[in-house]
Amino acid sequence: MTPNVIIVDSGANLASLQFALQRLKCRAKVTLDGPTIASAERVFLPGVGAAGHAMRRLRDAGLIDVLRTLTQPVLGICLGMQLLFRRSAEGATACLSMLPSVVQSLTATPGLPVPHMGWNELQPLREDPLLDGIEKGDQAYFVHSYAAPVTEHTLASSEYGLAIAAVVRHKNFWGTQFHPERSSRTGARVLENFLRL
């Protein structure tokens, strides 16, 4: 029996995440309703675009305290992962503060344009149920201009001019900087692992 799964309606195009979950026999409801989110067994917090816009959308929906007090497994994806941190350098945006670090902008260098778009290797740093079956060198698909530093909360890193956090965790909050719904076998395994937590 699949768990009651909710996708927070962050304003992003959520079809690819819904399709990826359907391939795993999971139907997820998209909502901004606080009580519905609070009662879910699993919560996805996806996001694309600007941190300030995403935080305003969550604030206008009355979801800041709802999200901060969730006790079930939560998975932030891409910008959704960045929103789990204390602050984003993008517009000096105050975020949800589940994780203490500040998300910084990537710096373009020759051969490494920003935004970072494409496949990149994962480097698992510590064991976690979310990374069951994920090996060093497995590829995931990234699209981002900002990144979180590697800290004690980092489960896996990736390299893009410097080491960046690719997967993070604090208590019941996980995050992936990459898009698991677009990351083929690796992403499907991460989503499947999350549904099993």
Image (cartoon, grey):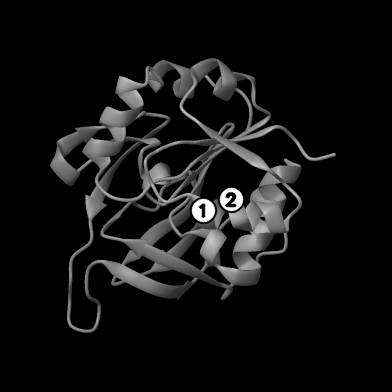
Judged from the image, the secondary structure of the residue bearing numbered disc 1 is helix
Question: Mark 2 is on which residue type?
Answer: Gln
Determine the residue positioned at 46% across, 61% down.
Answer: 157
Residue at the (31%, 30%) spot, across then down: 57
Any part of residue 155 in sight:
no
Q: CA distance from mark 2 to mark 1?
A: 5 Å
Q: Which residue is most to the right?
A: 1
- Element type at marker 2? helix
The x, y position of residue 84, in whole percent, is 40, 36
Disc assigned to residue 65 = none
Can residue 54 be seen from the camera position used here?
yes
Q: Is residue 105 left or right of residue 72?
A: left
For label 2, the crowd category at 10 Å Cα-Cα, with few meaning under 14, some 14 to 19 and many 20 or more, is some
Seen from the viewer's position, the closer of residues 150 and 16 is: 16
- Residue at figure coordinates x 36%, y 28% from the top left: 96
Query: Splitting the image into 4 quarters, where does residue 46 fall?
Result: top left
Q: Which residue is mark 1?
A: 15
Q: Which residue is mark 2?
A: 18
Against 197, residue 62 (above or below) is above
